[in-house]
Image (cartoon, rainbow, N blue to C red):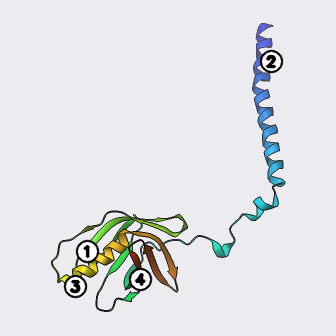
Amino acid sequence: MTNRRFGYAALLAALVPMASLMAGSAEAQSRRGRQAPQEQQQQIPPAEQEKSFPTGASWAASSLNGKPISDRRATFLIDANLRGTGFGGCNTFSATAYPLRQQGLAVGPIALTKRTCDKGLLDFERAYLTALRAARNWDIVDGKLVVKGAAGEVRFERGL
C-alpha cells in the first residue's frame, strides 16, 4: 500500500508543474492575440529594411572629401572573413573591418607595406587611410559605396 501511495504522489507531483506550464502557455498565446495596435505596427516596412554590406565586392575610390580622384588609384574590399584589404596609392593595406547594424562600420588598426613613393602620393595615401580608419558609417548611393567618418568621406565605384 505504501508503494501505491508513493506512486500516486509522484504522478501528482509530475502533473502539477505540467498543468501550470500549459496554463502559462495558453495565457501567453492569448496575450499575443490581443497585442496593442502600436506593437503590431512597429514592424519595419520592406522599403526601410536594413541594407547588407556588399562583402566580397572590390571598390575603387572615386572621391576623397568631395574632391575627385583622377590621378591616383585607391581600392577597398571587405571579404567574408571581415578582413579589409586594398591599395592606398603607394602601399597595400589590411585591417579588420566590421560592417555593423544601422549601416555602421568599424575599421581596426591598419597594417601596410613600406614602399617609398613621392611625397604627394604618400600624403594622399595618408588622408585616404585616415578616412577609412575613422569610418563610422557606410551607404550605397546610386550604386556607389559611400564611407563617412570624423576624418572625411570616401566615395567608391564598383571595381573590377
Position of the N terminus by quadrant: top right
Residue for badge 3: 120
Q: CA distance from mark 3 to mark 1?
A: 17 Å
Spatial CA distance of label 4 from label 2 is: 74 Å
113 relative position to 146: left or right: left
Viewer-nearest of labels 4 and 2?
4
Looking at the image, which residue is at 55% across and 67% down?
102
Tell me where residue 104 appears, x and y as whole percent.
49, 67
> The C terminus appears in which quarter of the rendering?
bottom left
Q: Residue lying at the far bottom in this picture: please name it.
A: 70
Q: Earlier in the sequence, mark 1 or mark 4?
A: 1
Quarter assignment of residue 64:
bottom left
Q: Which residue is mark 2?
A: 8
Q: Amino acid at mark 4?
A: Phe
Disc 1 residue type (three-letter): Thr
State the separation of the CA atoms marked 4 and 3. 21 Å
Closer to the observer: label 3 or label 2? 3
